[in-house]
């Protein structure tokens, strides 16, 4: 594969590509929606993927740091670190007007969006690009989709895995040749919309302590998924356009939502609907703001003929859910 020569890049560069990128990595107290950022790094790149500058900060999560054996950041190291609201302006300035690039970008974006929401601010990000998705678009011959494999493919040496600054550096160095390969081959970048959170869950999940080591953090795993009571109503079948939702319908969600997903799912359950973790022939409705994405849920929904609506339409439907058949 021949990369675009730097001397011809400006003339040959696709005009539809973004004008700048912010390659980010965050280390966190865990993977749940109430977890916090403990460190963050941003490499700013120009339109052709050249590094402009970089920035790194520790963040005091105001709670147990979680998996220290992964990120190496203890409570003592974080005690004097700034709180997120104290670094939000700087982080905002480095993200503003750029496409957020990350490895498994939905996770990094979700953590950043929730931290901004807690700080009563809005992250100035409108699009994100996941380097996992880009690697798939380019059909790179990787043994797996880990960052270390992407780095090795392009000859980038990792020095400190799970250190936000080094992971962001590694990703920036691997993203540039990926970007040039995409430009040379005329590949459409897998850009997805980022929707800033409008409502979010401020309290930790039931049973989790905010002070001291959390029992849910184990060396061999993460916090288990949240358990919900079974829906008491039978499934009445698929949603039909221009008709109300009916109690018992199975609703699945895919992609970003402007309301915190956990809060949206709570509202769904409170309305007498069943929150489905996957899509099958029994699914009544799929809610997604990006119906053209190639997620497993959207692909299955289209294959099964499952109705698809966006978040705005769904929240409107939630206002008037019909009772279950008696």
Image (cartoon, rainbow, N blue to C red):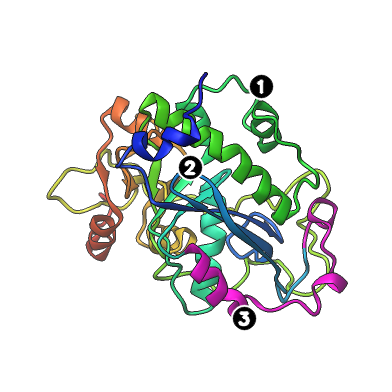
Q: Is residue 75 visible?
A: yes
Instruction: Pinpoint residue 293: horizontal percent, then vertical percent.
Output: 36, 37
Q: Which residue is mark 1?
A: 143
- Does dot 3 land on a helix, a strand or a loop? helix
- Does dot 1 land on a helix, a strand or a loop? loop
Instruction: Pinpoint residue 224: horizontal percent, then vertical percent.
Output: 67, 50
Q: Earlier in the sequence, mark 2 or mark 3?
A: 3
In front: label 1 or label 2? 1
The label shown at residue 86 is 3
Q: In the rendered structure, does residue 133 fall within the stretch colored magenta?
A: no
Mark-to-mark CA distance, 1 and 2: 28 Å
Q: Residues within 10 Å of mark 1 (few under 14, many from 20)?
A: few
- Does dot 2 land on a helix, a strand or a loop? loop
Say if 232 sits above or below 187 in the image. Answer: below
Name the one closer to the observer, 266 or 162. Answer: 162
Q: Which residue is mark 2?
A: 277
Q: Earlier in the sequence, mark 1 or mark 3?
A: 3
Residue at 74%, 71% (x, y): give it.
209
Residue 202 occupies quadrant = bottom right
Q: In the rendered structure, does residue 89 fall within the stretch colored magenta?
A: yes
In magenta, the rendered stretch is 66-95
Residue at 70%, 53% (x, y): give it.
223
Name the one closer to the observer, 149 or 176. Answer: 176
Instruction: Pinpoint residue 221: horizontal percent, then vertical percent.
Output: 76, 45
Q: Is residue 10 left or right of residue 148?
A: left
Q: Are marks 2 and 3 in contact (CB under 8 Å)?
A: no
Q: Residues within 10 Å of mark 3 (few under 14, many from 20)?
A: few
Q: Are marks 1 and 2 in contact (CB under 8 Å)?
A: no
Mark-to-mark CA distance, 1 and 3: 40 Å
Say if 19 sits above or below 151 in the image. Answer: below
Residue at 37%, 37% (x, y): give it.
13
């Amino acid at each position: 594969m021949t990369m675009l020569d730097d001397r011809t890049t400006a003339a040959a560069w696709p005009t539809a590509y973004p004008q700048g990128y912010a390659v980010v990595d965050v280390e966190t107290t865990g993977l749940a929606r109430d977890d916090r950022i403990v460190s963050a790094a941003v490499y700013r790149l120009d339109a052709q993927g050249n590094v402009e500058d970089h920035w790194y900060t520790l963040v005091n999560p105001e709670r147990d740091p979680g998996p220290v054996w992964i990120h190496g950041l203890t409570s003592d190291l974080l005690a004097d670190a700034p709180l997120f609201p104290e670094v939000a302006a700087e982080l905002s300035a480095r993200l503003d007007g750029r496409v957020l690039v990350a490895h498994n970008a939905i996770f990094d974006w979700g953590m950043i969006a929730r931290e901004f929401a807690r700080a009563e601010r809005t992250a100035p990000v409108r699009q994100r690009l996941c380097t996992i998705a880009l690697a798939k678009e380019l059909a790179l011959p990787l043994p797996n989709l880990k960052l270390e494999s992407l780095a090795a493919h392009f000859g980038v040496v990792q020095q400190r895995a799970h250190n936000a600054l080094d992971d962001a550096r590694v990703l920036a160095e691997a993203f540039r040749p990926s970007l040039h390969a995409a430009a040379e081959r005329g590949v459409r970048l897998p850009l997805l919309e980022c929707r800033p959170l409008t409502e979010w869950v401020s309290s930790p999940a039931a049973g989790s302590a905010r002070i001291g080591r959390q029992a849910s953090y184990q060396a061999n795993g993460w916090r288990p998924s949240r358990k919900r009571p079974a829906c008491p109503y039978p499934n009445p079948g698929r949603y039909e356009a221009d008709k109300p939702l009916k109690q018992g319908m199975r609703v699945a969600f895919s992609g970003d939502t402007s309301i915190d997903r956990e809060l949206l799912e709570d509202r769904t359950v409170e309305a007498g609907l069943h929150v489905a973790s996957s899509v099958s022939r029994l699914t009544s409705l799929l809610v997604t703001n990006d119906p053209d994405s190639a997620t497993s849920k959207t692909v299955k929904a289209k294959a099964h003929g499952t109705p698809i609506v966006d978040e705005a339409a769904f929240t409107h439907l939630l206002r008037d859910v019909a009772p279950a058949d008696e």
